[in-house]
Image (cartoon, rainbow, N blue to C red):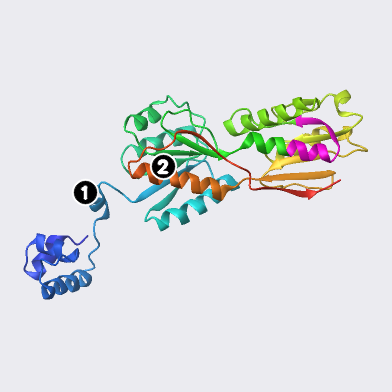
Amino acid sequence: MAIRLSDIAQACKVDISTVSRALHNDPRVRENTRELIRRTAKKMRYAPNLAARNLAAGTTKTLWLLVPDLKNPIQQEPAQFLSERLSREGYDLMIVLYHDEPDAFRRLLMRLTQNVADGAFIIPSGIAYDAPEYTSLKKNQYPLVFLDRRAELKSCATVTTDNAAAAAELVARCIQDGANRFVIMFEKSNSAGHERLQGAEKALSRQKIPYLIFDKPEIANASFMKNGRTAILASSSFSVYAFYEHNKQHFPVTPPIAGVFDQWNDRTENFAGIYICRQDFHGIAEKAADIMLEKLKGKKTESGLHHIPALDFISLKKP
């Protein structure tokens, strides 16, 4: 059974308010009485009720990072950087997974309305921003900062990579290595992929280079693929390699070039060149933390999109 202040008070033959003051090192309690109460509390293995203390103070000193999983750098690295930064500010970061399940995501959003944390960083699921769960948080002006994907919520900020510029740079590097036609497979279903698609399309249209857009890996038109070097752009190496497998009959002489984000996890021997855009997850986390801490201080913060330039571009392989 948990030891209460009243148990310590009874053991020390003082009232409860004296015990509370002594445990908070209040100078109004004589030193010898404070020492007696501290010794007694330690002997009885008293543990303070942090939930009650936080409720009285109006803060939990805890923040959530709500993510679909921890499989990719966009989840792993911001979690690490945010935890380190917030710890220096006296906050604990809780990593909360919703396993890419909309129902679990909705349930966890509703938990946030119950003051389980002072605020939340979110890599969002696909539920609409006018859903009741978001509406409730917005009504209560709950501090939210979104990562990676744009949030269509007024007064909320999203911190993400400058995806359009990053995709345009991948295009430029592939062109430098001889690519004269492109296959683009950035996901249109989320804002990051949509921005990458727009950036690649704009760069290619400006240079009048032909391209095809695919929602998923599939067999491409043979006439488009012949007589030149094809570059395949996607967010992940899995998508690039799957497209190659569907169309490897088109690359008997001239292997393609690949451009992806963050990491390459597949075989490399079938590609003439591979470029990787590494996102600045440290910079994203720092900006998100700055915005959240300002919100928690009651200061007005900038809503909308905050773009962080890509960290760098590395060549895993060159023609």
Disc 1 secondary structure class: helix
Q: Is residue 202 magenta?
A: no
Q: Residue at x 17, y 72 (%)?
A: 40
Left or right of 220 on screen, residue 93: left
Q: What's the magenta region?
A: 170-183
Q: Nearer the viewer, residue 242 or 143?
A: 143
Q: Where does residue 318 sit, x and y in percent of width and height?
A: 83, 47
Report crowding for label 2: few under 14, some 14 to 19, many 20 or more residues within 10 A (C-alpha).
many
Which numbered disc covers residue 56? Answer: 1
Q: Residue at x 42, y 25 (%)?
A: 131
Q: Residue at x 90, y 38 (%)?
A: 254
Left or right of 210 on screen, residue 22: left
Amino acid carrying mark 1 in the image: Ala
Residue indicated by mark 2? 120
N-terminal-most mark, 2 or 1: 1
Amino acid carrying mark 2 in the image: Ala
Can residue 71 be seen here? The reply is: no
Q: Residue at x 51, y 53 (%)?
A: 81
Q: Where does residue 88 sit, x and y in percent of width and height?
A: 41, 58
